[in-house]
Image (spheres, helix red, strand yellow):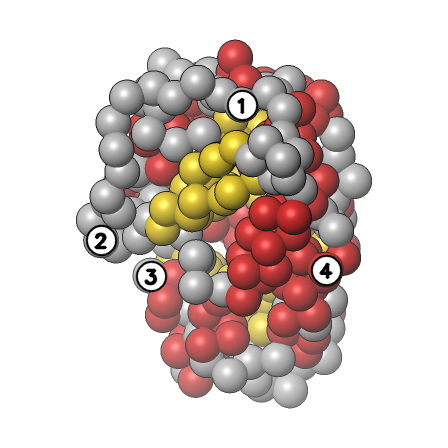
Amino acid sequence: MKRRLTATLAALTLGTLAACSGGEPSAPTSADPENPVTVTIGVADKAQEYWTTFTDLAEREGIDVELVNFTDYQQPNPALSSGQLDLNQFQHLLFLADYNVNAGDDLTPIGSTLIYQLALYSTKGYATPDDIPDGAEIAIPNDATNQARALLVLQAAGLVTLTGGGDALSTPADVDESASRVTVVPVDANQTAVQLQSLDGAVINNTFATDAGLDPTEAIFSDLDDPDQARPYANVWVARAEDADNPVYAQLVEIYQRDEVVGQLEDENKGTAVRPDLSPEELQSSLTDLEDLVRDQS
């Protein structure tokens, strides 16, 4: 039986909830500069410059954006569900699927942002996965979401084989050792880059790669090479189900997706984050599939 993601993700708590007012708001349905409306959005990176660009553009169109910053990933979804927020934008589809299933909720994606690569790095002089010798040791993150994704990265790179082909909830127990070329070494995600000093390689997310001074363009393999595999990790705008078709919220998604805003993130990531061309309907269909997967393997 697979571990439930919620139990593991709860261990990622980083801080406390930013102050929010209670009570469920009435969702605005139209906005213009003469009749401005206020929309409260839960985020995890309020200090980033692109949010200033976003809020300025929204204000010109009559939408006053209030950003509420969270450092605990377990709190923005309950805050949205209870009406403390109008929207949130901090998570990928798999995280949302796990939340909905385990909380009995129906929060809904209404637009995509970016997919950030999860990539394989090495400092041993290997230029491609084929150069990595049999019997090598590769560090992977040990948190449930990134661990499964890292295993799929290594499988796509031809370094491990997962029983049954693997899925978004795979664990190291699913590695077919006799059919795999390398051994995986699970470590805390913030230690994956450190392991490059002693192991043959490591699968490292963009945040920790940047913190370690690694150039994301020098990764020797990335799951962005297979967009379908990366789809569960598309970051999304999320609303309550009853607000999924709200025109003001759709307007905010459109503003975010403009080059002036999301283009800043693409530049910062040197082309290692991509915009998925996914409609709200496609996102919602993918979410349903992931929710079924979580239920089946919980």
Front: mark 2 or 3 = 2
Q: Nearer the viewer, residue 170 or 270?
A: 270
Q: Is residue 256 above or below residue 96?
A: below
Q: Between marks 2 and 3, how big is the CA–CA gap? A: 18 Å
Residue annotated with mark 4: 260
- Frontmost of labels 4 and 1 is 1
Q: Distance between the residues labelled 2 and 1?
A: 31 Å
Q: How far apart are marks 4 and 1 (CA)?
A: 25 Å
Task: Give me the residue at 70% from left, 70% from top.
Answer: 267
- Where disc 3 sits, the SS reads loop
Of callouts 2 and 1, the N-terminal one: 2
Q: From what the image shows, is residue 105 above or below residue 232?
A: above
Closer to the observer: label 4 or label 3?
4
Mark 3 vs mark 1, foreground winner is: 1
The amino acid pointed to by label 2 is: Gly
> Going from the N terminus, do you reach mark 2 or mark 3 first?
2
Q: Calculate the distance from the C-alpha at mark 4 to the C-alpha at mark 3.
A: 35 Å
In the image, is residue 139 above or below residue 278?
below
Residue identified by numbered label 2: 15
Q: Residue 28 carries which label?
A: 1
Quarter of the image that includes the C terminus: top left
Work out which quarter of the rendered image holds the N terminus and state it.
top left
